[in-house]
Amino acid sequence: MKKRVLALTMAAVMAFSLAGCSTSGSAPADSQAAEGSEQAAEGGEAAANSGETVKIVCPYGVGGTADAIARKYALVANKHSDYNFIVENMTGGDGFQAANWYTDQDPSTTDLLVYGFGVAYRHDLGKKYQTEVVDFDRNDIYPVADVDDRTWIVYAKSGTTLADILDKAKNGGVKMSGGNPLSDPHLALGSLLAVDGGTVMTVPYDGGAAQKKGLTDGEVDVFVGTTQAAIEDVEAGTITPILAFCEGSFEGFKGPDGDITVPGVAGEGMAPELDSSKDYTGSILPAGGFIAVRTGADQAWIDEIVEISEAVWADPEYTDWMKEIMLNEKPLYGEDAKAFLEEGCEKAVAAFELLSGQQ
């Protein structure tokens, strides 16, 4: 297994603005793959087709948002093709292990990769700023279909306000859970707080459940995660959403007292605690990910995956489920998907430069 380490250059940057960051452990890839071969209970069992088995490699653990989406995609894709789509989990390095493995495969492979924005963001930062060792070239991964578009949400313990967090960020810094240092949730919150001179420290945990527990146990001040990760917790009143990384407000959450409208970082629904004279839109980073093939794959195979992905997005079983967990409907394919990724990577580099003081 290739080991991811932080470079000395990044250590100096972190000591100045992101002190206390560290990397989290990962579950063994083989045990995760064994678990991942089973369809998620919520999605049901995938129908067995008579055709070729196509493996979808998910770089994250069983039960997370990326894993749930991969399984729902496989379930619905099996209805619209003769292939047997199955999901296997290959964890490690917060997505880097699977990317390393996948880029070592021959371009003719029919294995697919769940390819997240966060992996691409950290790849570019590692290459440009030596923030970590990068043992793969993301140009060897081609995003075929955007199947996961999400809005990052800042969650706090009930009773904590956005004003409390902004004040703490400017007076000693806040602690957050939600990925490792320079994950896309960290880039989003860190760049937003940096606009007002605030700082954030990322405390890594292994998985969303542990990230939420870090918040409820008082080990961190906020958890930055997906809508799917915290729906039940918000309904129970254990935690509350205080900010959405989007323009306008975010609707859909329900708490113990009814519907919750979450303010955004810009537009008419902008959080009143933010300075309306400042631009926070740089923190709205594209998030989620794609079904990807190896660059150089046969065009006929790419076209077939596009066709299947279009059928998946057209199926209410997929789109209605996405609405239930409050993810966004943003189907993009081929070069349009690739352009969206490149746009996000440019924003991520700018966000890093802001939060690290390298602008």
Image: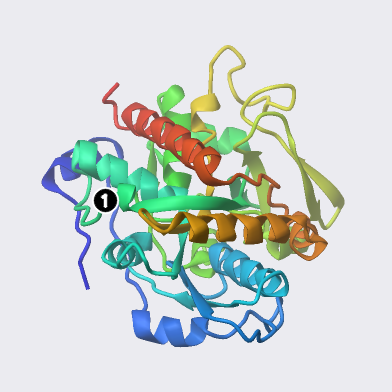
| Residue located 54% across and 15% down the image | 278
Q: Quadrant of the N terminus?
A: bottom left
| Residue located 61% across and 48% down the image | 149
Residue 269 location, x and y as percent?
A: 73, 27
| Residue located 42% across and 67% down the image | 59
Taking 118 as reference, is 145 left or right?
A: right
The amino acid pointed to by label 1 is Asp
Give the answer, above or below, for where 36 lies relative to 318: below
SS class, disc 1: loop
| Residue 101 falls in image quadrant | bottom left
Residue 111 visible? The answer is yes
Residue 224 visible? The answer is no
Q: Residue furthest top?
A: 277
Residue 295 location, x and y as percent?
A: 36, 53
Residue 84 location, x and y as percent?
A: 59, 80
Q: Nearer the viewer, residue 241 or 161?
A: 241
